[in-house]
Image: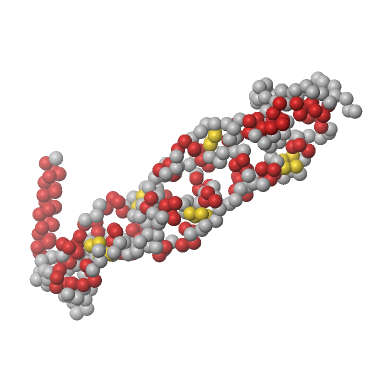
Amino acid sequence: MIKNTYTAVVRLVLYIIFYFLFLTPAVVFADKKSCTDCHDSIEKEKVMHPAVQFGCSVCHIAPHAKKTPELSLVMKPPDLCFMCHDKKVFTEKDKHVPVAEGKCTTCHSPHSSRNTYLLLKKPPSLCFTCHDKKVFTEKDKHVPVAEGKCTTCHSPHSSRNTYLLLKKPPSLCFTCHGKKVFTEKYKHVPVAEGKCTTCHSPHSSRNTYLLLKKPPDLCFTCHGNGILSQKVKHPPAEEGKCLTCHNPHSSNYFMMMKKPVNELCTACHKAESSGRHVLAEYGTGNIHPVQGKINPAQTDEPLTCISCHNPHSSSRQLLFPNQQGASHNLCLMCHTKVHVPLN
């Protein structure tokens, strides 16, 4: 404690000696008013750099000492800026390029500005000086982008995260988007891994929901188009309406279904909810169970509509599984000891 206090006092004394030896010649002590007689623009705007109010000699040493006027800064930026501004804010792992190069005046006026934070322009116009505007101006825009609020997600100086993000996804996304939608029992793999940008553009897109592609092409990026390659296709799947049946983020139901399988199917196929349709071909009015039992052909799964129908596509009518032979062969998947007449 004593040592730290001593060190601080020594540094203060040295700074005072330096200030009076080098920063106070008559040529430097020309007051601010005399500088602004020629350089009136430096304090013209609404937002003033405090250093200007303290006097030009805070940053400049004898700018007219030589025949040709020069900036004659006390030290080079960004070290000059660090005399007042906390260095840590600018020296995290991932740095904004102008910050890394010590070019503070790429974004900020050193004297005065009509914009907050002494910015040369208001965001996002300032950002478009370097960043391609097209990336941010597609039809569907992320709300912070549409409002020009780049710093909702990004640090303008430096960050411990890539892309200068304030937090790592998905924590950053949960700042605005409700967490519950993404944290149900069954999670879409990109969601579980926090890879929101696997499916969404963070800035803007020509597609709704900021999607990188329209479904089903977006889904085929990972799931392959083989699931729709057969002749007979389930209409919602064929039309790219994957979200008719599936939640894109997370769900409490297997395969990220919006509802339990049979409840989902009978929302459209109401007449088949009783199970009577299963035996209709054989002229019997008996009801075949379609739920509430174990699937005999797959004993680790319950009996549901997809025990007999492929939900995406099939080479056979009624989306029956792709097995060879007559339709009654479907029955033999479970009823292995039953003889079914061929006529």
Residue 94 sits above or below residue 321 on the image: below
Coloring basis for residues: secondary structure
Horizontal and vertical percent position of residue 293: 67, 21
Left or right side of 290 for 69: left
**Residue at the spot x=53%, y=49% of the render?**
209
Residue lying at the far top of the rendered structure: 337
Nearest the viewer among 253 and 18 is 253
Q: Position of residue 319 (x, y in %)?
A: 74, 37
* Residue positioned 32% across, 52% down in the render: 91
Can residue 43 be seen? Answer: yes
Q: Residue 94, can we see it? A: no
Q: In the picture, which quadrant includes the N terminus?
A: top left
Please state which of residues 50 and 18 is positioned toward the viewer in this rendering. Answer: 50
Residue 288 x/y as whole percent: 74, 23
Mark count? 0
Give me the residue at 11% from left, 46% from top.
6
The image quarter containing residue 219 is top right
Query: Residue at the spot x=52%, y=31% of the render?
Result: 185
Foreground residue, 221 or 258?
A: 258
Q: Position of residue 7 (x, y in %)?
A: 13, 48
